[in-house]
Amino acid sequence: MEKLFSKLCIDIFRQSIDDYHVTDNVDSVIKNPYTHPNIEYYLYLKNTIDTVQWHLEDIIRRPDIDPVEALKIKRRIDKSNQDRTDLVELIDSWFLDKYKDVKHLPEVTINTETPAWAVDRLSILTLKIYHMRCETLRADASREHIEACKQKLKVLEEQENDLSQAIDSLISDIAAGRKYMKIYKQMKMYNDPALNPELYGK
């Protein structure tokens, strides 16, 4: 039986997170264990980008961070966001190609978001679960903190289950012709020198 797509995602995301935390360093080079251009390769890369950015977002919030260093990290985060968006669109292109020959049913409808953007949320959710679980295991935290984090972890795990079901249901609907998808390029304006007035106006 073919593994549900959400299960494939979660397994690869967890693998990526574990691989990152071997060194727990935003500058470490992480080798993708999957073959390009398989979907597993893209999923691993997707979560690797998210994981590094997660930790960059932590670092930039240090109250004692040097402003020059903070600006460098902000630039890295901007680049990471663009890479993340590009990769989501690439994964959606994979879905479009996979189901390009499906005949739509007369009652076919479009979904509010594409499969890859839902997978993007699942990647972030897997990171939240990992780090919230770490909080429940802290030896230096109060009992109240541990208990609060355990409750939050339960909610996150419920979200993961619900989102997984929604992703698999959407993919099933696309495969059966009950739903169809489009890719709307994000067209981020602030990164484009031709569209950001702070850049083209100088």
Image (spheres, rainbow, N blue to C red):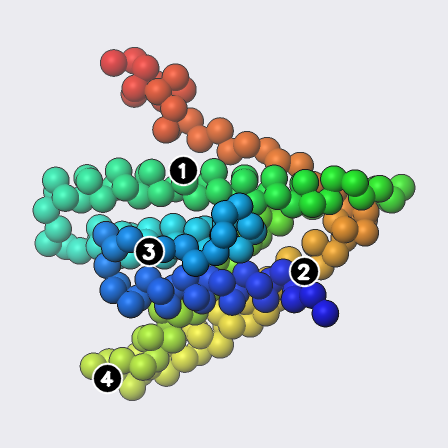
Of badges 2 and 4, the one in the foreground is 2
Which tag, 2 or 4, sits closer to the chain's start? 4
The answer to whether residue 79 is seen in the rendering is yes
Left or right, 93 with respect to 130, comes to right
Query: Given the image, on which type of amino acid does mark 2 rest?
Result: Asp
Q: Which mark is residue 176?
A: none
Q: Which mark is residue 139?
A: 4
Tell me the quarter of the image containing the N terminus. bottom right
Per the image, label 2 sits on a secondary structure element best described as helix
Q: CA distance from mark 2 to mark 4?
A: 38 Å
Per the image, label 3 sits on a secondary structure element best described as loop
Mark 3 sits on what residue?
30
Residue 67, image x, y percentages: 12, 42
Residue 29, image x, y percentages: 28, 53
Q: Which mark is residue 168?
A: 2
Residue 72 location, quadrant: top left
Residue sitting at x 38%, y 24%: 192
Residue sitting at x 40%, y 70%: 130
Residue 84 location, quadrant: top left
Tell me the quarter of the image containing the C terminus. top left
Which tag, 2 or 1, sits closer to the chain's start? 1
Query: Given the image, on which type of amino acid does mark 1 rest?
Result: Gln
Mark 1 sits on what residue?
82
Residue 4 location, quadrant: bottom right
Which tag, 2 or 3, sits closer to the chain's start? 3
Within 10 Å of disc 2 (Cα), the crowding (few <14, some 14-19, many 20+) is some
